[in-house]
Image (cartoon, rainbow, N blue to C red):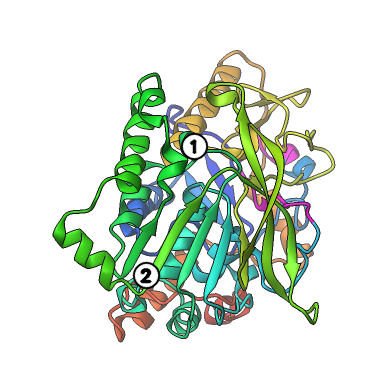
Amino acid sequence: MEDKDREHPQAHVDIYEKQPVPFGLVRFGVAPDHPEVKNVINTFTQTAHSGRCAFWGNVEVGRDVTVPELREAYHAVVLSYGAEDHRALEIPGEELPGVCSARAFVGWYNGLPENRELEPDLSCDTAVILGQGNVALDVARILLTPPEHLERTDITKAALGVLRQSRVKTVWLVGRRGPLQVAFTIKELREMIQLPGARPILDPADFLGLQDKIKEVPRPRKRLTELLLRTATEKPGPEEAARRASASRAWGLRFFRSPQQVLPSPDGRRAAGVRLAVTRLEGVGEATRAVPTGDMEDLPCGLVLSSVGYKSRPVDPSVPFDSKLGVIPNVEGRVMDVPGLYCSGWVKRGPTGVIATTMTDSFLTGQMLLQDLKAGLLPSGPRPGYAAIQALLSSRGVRPVSFSDWEKLDAEEVARGQGTGKPREKLVDPQEMLRLLGH
């Protein structure tokens, strides 16, 4: 959440962040075995080093400071706080131990403070992930990757310890629709197919008649579907066949299945399976819907991870919010009926797209803000900016974490990782972070 950009040589931008540390989903969402995706941190760091940009972490907007207070202190305010909630399955048994959101699971292995005590029970042999997007594949990959392959990543020490003890051998990824509707992308799928020590399980029957349908679909989707089709129907070469035969773990895609209920164990104390409704597809293209056929199927498992999407929360009663769509109502990033207030990213468009799409989107919001500035639609007199907010935070006992504070924490994390050959050992406890900074 911030104020203006580089197209305007006098602009000052202050970034307020709920976590004590910067980088949001790049730090807490991107998988530990995808370090190249985190390179964007270098760009962010350059921006933060500008004399006209300041970072203030450990400040929760809506709790520590309100949006009207920010609007009073700045010429413009941009909300870009994303989608921090997960979409519920809304089925019986969802509250049983052994069921958790993929979002919380990702937060746990990535060191998100609020998920550090998750401690998932991986003593079962089968896990079911409900959903077939990139997050579902990330979670499946982390569950099935040999732990020694994760030792040199920034996965948390606690998560690595639990994964070393894991007995999970099979992971099913369940989707309501078919192979043509999967939401993951080809890079993530290819990685999964080549995962050391794991073999794919795909039912050739799910792919009948697909060869003809592929011709009509756009190229990225076509390449993805062809890879699925080959993996499902072609006999692997001798080398790949040997690799699969020696694999001790497996993962599979279950299509045309919609979760109806999480089944309890005999004592009713934890999850023991998922009851699935068999579906068939109605309609064409992207508008294809899954309709239940009336058949049911039970899939036994000891761990259920729901990965059916994210949703944004309202941040402050003064900001309009569409709870059905889970976005701030806006026109091209301008918040409806609130001059000088803007939004970007998932809270503006809904929870879809990757880092690149979200960056493009934030540039568009920035351009709208600058247009409004040029058109004289923003307040004209001076505004106190951080000086006013600092006084409010101080009176409320909130200690913001600056970017140079973060660089101390960063150095500490890197030092802690060095002994074990990791790029860093993430600090996961905000109290410890503040203690290290002498706050």
Identified by mark 1, the residue type is: Thr
Magenta highlight: main SS: loop
Whether residue 57 is visible, yes or no, is no
Q: Residue at x 60, y 58 (%)?
A: 103
Q: Residue at x 46, y 62 (%)?
A: 140
In this rendering, the answer to whether 31 lies above or below 415 is above
Q: How many marks?
A: 2
Q: Position of residue 84 (x, y in %)?
A: 65, 52
Q: Is residue 75 magenta?
A: yes
Q: Nearer the viewer, residue 344 or 218?
A: 218
Q: Residue at x 41, y 69 (%)?
A: 144
Q: Nearer the viewer, residue 151 or 62?
A: 151
Quick one: SS at disc 2? loop
In this rendering, the answer to whether 227 lies above or below 18 is above
Circle 1 is placed at which residue position?
A: 358
Q: Residue at x 43, y 83 (%)?
A: 164
Range drawn in magenta: 71-91
